[in-house]
Image (tube, helix red, strand yellow):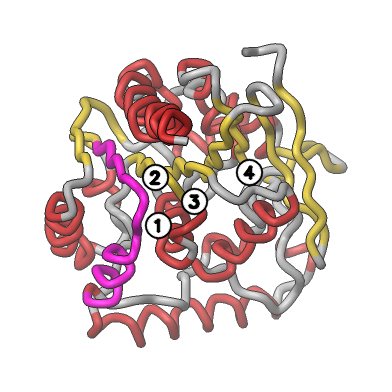
Amino acid sequence: MAAKVSELCVPVPWGEIRGRVWGPEHGRPVLCLHGWADNCGAFKTLIPLLPKEFRYIAVDLVGHGLSSHRPPGHFYSLPEYVTDVLRVTDALQLRKFSVIGHSMGGDVAGMFSALYPEMVDALVLLDNYGILPTDSKEICKVARQGMDQILQFEKKTEEEKRRVYTYEKAVERLLAANPTLSERSVHILLERGLVQVEGGFAFSRDLRVNFKNIVRISLEQSLEIQSRIQASVLAVLTDKGFDKILSEPAQRKFTSALLEGLKNRNHTVVWVPGDHHVHLNNPEVIAPFVSDFLRTKVLSQSINRQHKL
């Protein structure tokens, strides 16, 4: 499949959404959404191990990789990412497709699947339980933190915002910030995660993606959204992953409720050994589960429908 890789570019009102596409032109579409501060390179090692009857469309979420940053004065939030996905699927004229989402990309995938259930036939959550809620008592505090961060950022000069590294220093910085990444994975992510500038390299992602997300939901809202997903769901969770890296400890108490919600709706939950980036570091660990799920829930269902016709 290595030869069938092309660059994706979808125009949006403020620039473009970029990405990469693997697989045959008429393959069944699978949209791949990476996690926070990553880019579509996060799927580079996994996709070649998945069924070749599919066309895998991996996007750089806005503000990440080679996609344009949001205009000045804008925030990054889950509803806006969902709208971006809708822009991409509309531009590509995708009416029915599957979605694979890792971490934050799983949140985006989950909300999209709930809002547009008729468009998604199968949903794969990689080290993600669905849309992660925030403790109701913390919502105001977190929203204020995000607003304050944006205002402070906007007061900085362009020179103060500019951070230039040697390639080696950029590798060091990404490894330090993401201890779950292997060195090989860091180099893969930096293929789209760095841009050459005067004096060295700068990270391509928008610094504003680092700020607190100001749009938060409660556990009740999260479970309601989860209940509206009609697609078959596979959640692949890791023993050293998501729970260990949550930035807000209060969120840990919600993961069991989300897990229970998935199981109560007869969705598939599997646990694998590994950490948060196992899909990139050791894709062979999760590929059999994802492959079997796509074949069973998408290809087999499609064949059955054709036979009935």
Q: Around disc 4, counting alpha carbons within 10 Å, would you say few (fewer than 14), some (14 to 19), or many (20 or more)?
A: many
Distance from disc 2 to disc 4, alpha carbons, whole Å, reads: 16 Å
Viewer-closest of 181 and 39: 39
Q: Position of residue 19 (x, y in %)?
A: 69, 39
Q: Indicate the amino acid at tag 2.
A: Leu
The answer to whether one can see residue 181 in this image is: no
Q: How far apart are marks 1 and 4 (CA)?
A: 16 Å
Give the residue at the far front of this rendering.
309
Instruction: Give the number of the disc on residue 158.
Output: none
Q: What element carries label 2?
A: strand
Mark closer to the chain start, 1 or 3: 3
Q: Where is residue 138 in the image (x, y as percent from the top left)?
A: 28, 81
Which residue does the numbered mark 4 point to in the structure image? 59
The residue identified by callout 2 is 123
Q: Which mark is residue 110?
A: 1
Q: Name the residue under label 3.
A: 36
3D distance between C-alphas at marks 2 and 1: 8 Å
